[in-house]
Image: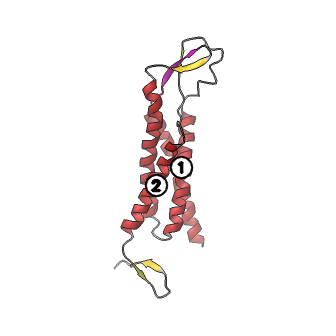
Amino acid sequence: MGRRLARLLVVLVAFAVSGVLAGVVWHALWTPPSGVYYHDEWVIDAAGAPQDVGGTALYVVVGLVAGLVVGFAVTLTSRRDEMLVLAAVAVGSGVAGALMAITGHALGPPDPRPLAAGQKDFTAADADLRVEGTSPYVAYPAGALSAATASFLLLNGPRRRDPENRFEAEPDE
């Protein structure tokens, strides 16, 4: 049981670290949308509108790629206990997606909307880095679970029954 717990913890830590790193990458690739304060509100300007959508789209791309890479890597290093590892990938990739969003948001500029009251009209301010909606959060887990499942199905090799009636991978010769 000790090895199983260690394997589970390694997978979870790998995803947590990768989520933070993916948040740094997301922030580094992102261009903040520009806007202005007008009548105590922050309004995105014409030049900033494409970048506003681009932040969420970039989150999906970075999260999907990171999920694929980490999902494949952890399953290559964990060739036994597939169901346990797959469950850890599901949980870990969800945590990684959340950590990615938190890290990227923390590295970006503050949300200009709460700061709008009392600002002089037409004062420029960049938007914060955020994910719009909830559906983009499935990108990281989708990539990780796809890679993990493909890895287990395609790379584990043929199985046979052992005398104790358990399934195990064929030994390498």
Q: Quadrant of the N terminus?
A: bottom right
Q: Amino acid at mark 2?
A: Ala
How packed mark 2 is, by other alpha carbons closer than 10 Å (few <14, some 14-19, many 20 or more), is many
Assess whether residue 18 is covered by the magenta stretch. Answer: no
Q: Is residue 12 above or below residue 28?
A: below
Query: Image point 48% across, 25% down: which residue?
Result: 33
In primary-sequence order, the first of circles 1 and 2 is 1
Query: Image point 44% across, 33% down: which residue?
Result: 54
Query: Quick check: marks 1 and 2 in contact, CB under 8 Å?
Result: yes
Q: Quadrant of the C terminus?
A: bottom left
Farthest-out residue, left: 173
- The residue to which callout 1 is attached is 96
- The residue to which callout 2 is attached is 144
Query: Which contiguous range is marked in magenta?
Result: 30-38
- Please tell me whether mark 2 sits on a helix, a strand or a loop: helix
Farthest-out residue, right: 118
Query: Image point 41% across, 48% down: which residue?
Result: 65
Farthest-out residue, bottom: 163
Residue 111 in sight in this render: yes
- Please tell me whether mark 1 sits on a helix, a strand or a loop: helix
Query: Image point 48% across, 27% down: which residue?
Result: 32
Image quarter of residue 79: bottom left
Total count of labels: 2
Q: Amino acid at mark 1?
A: Ala
Image quarter of residue 156: bottom left
Between the residue at mark 1 and the residue at mark 2, the CA separation in whole angstroms equals: 10 Å
